Image (tube, grey):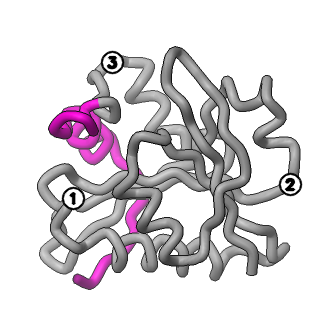
Amino acid sequence: MNWTTNKMTESYAKEILLWQYDSPYDFYNNELTDESLKELMNDTYLAVIDETKQLTGYYCTGISAIVPAGNEYGAYNESMIDIGLGLKPELTGAGRGGSFLAFILQNIENANIQCLPLRLTVASFNKRAIKLYENVGFITQQSFDSKGITFQTMIKYK
C-alpha cells in the first residue's frame, strides 16, 4: 500500500473513535466523547491515508503516546521520541502491519533531527504487535502495571 499523512480532522478522529477491534484487542476500543475527540485533535496525531484516500490508521508522538501510569515507574525518564499508532481493525492481522509501521517510522525518522531513540508502549498481551516491533529492531526496556494491565516500553536505537 502507498500511504500518506494528513492533519487529523474531526471527521477522521470520529471515525477512529468508532473503530471496534475483536477480542482480545477490544482493549483498544474507544468511545466517542468530547474528551476523546479533544485528545485526537490535539495536534500530536496524524491520520494515515491510503492511495484511495481512505483512512487506514493514525500515529502520534510525544505525551499522547505514553501511558501516564508509566511515569510512576520511571518508564519515560530518558529523553526519547514516544510514538503511538493504530491500524484500522479490518486491516489488522492481514500482513499489513509491517509496511504500515515502516511508513510511520520513516516519517518520524525524517523529522528526528536530534537523532533520539524511539520508544513505544504496548500492552504485554498484544503478542502480535510485540513481534512486529521486535522484527524492526525494538527491544523491551521495562514493564509496568496500570489498571490491571501490564504494559511494556520498547526502544529502538539508531
Residue at image position (49%, 25%) is: 149
- The label nearer to you, 2 versus 3, is 2
Residue at image position (84%, 73%) is: 114
Residue type, mark 3 in image: Thr
> Is 99 in front, or is 75?
75
Q: Secondary structure at mark 1?
A: loop
Quarter placement of the C terminus: bottom right
Residue 92's disc number: 1
Residue type, mark 1 in image: Thr
- Residue 129's image quarter? bottom left
> Disc 3 versus disc 1: distance between alpha carbons?
24 Å
Q: Earlier in the sequence, mark 2 or mark 1?
A: 2
Query: What range is drawn magenta here?
Result: 1-26
The residue pinned by badge 2 equals 79
Q: Please tell me whether residue 54 belongs to the stretch shown in magenta.
A: no
Q: Is residue 54 left or right of residue 137?
A: left
Q: Earlier in the sequence, mark 2 or mark 3?
A: 3
> Disc 2 versus disc 1: distance between alpha carbons?
31 Å
Q: Secondary structure at mark 3?
A: loop
> Is 103 in front, or is 156?
156
Label 2 CA crowd tier, 10 Å (few <14, some 14–19, many 20+): few
Residue at image position (66%, 53%) is: 82
The residue pinned by badge 3 equals 33
> Disc 2 versus disc 3: distance between alpha carbons?
32 Å
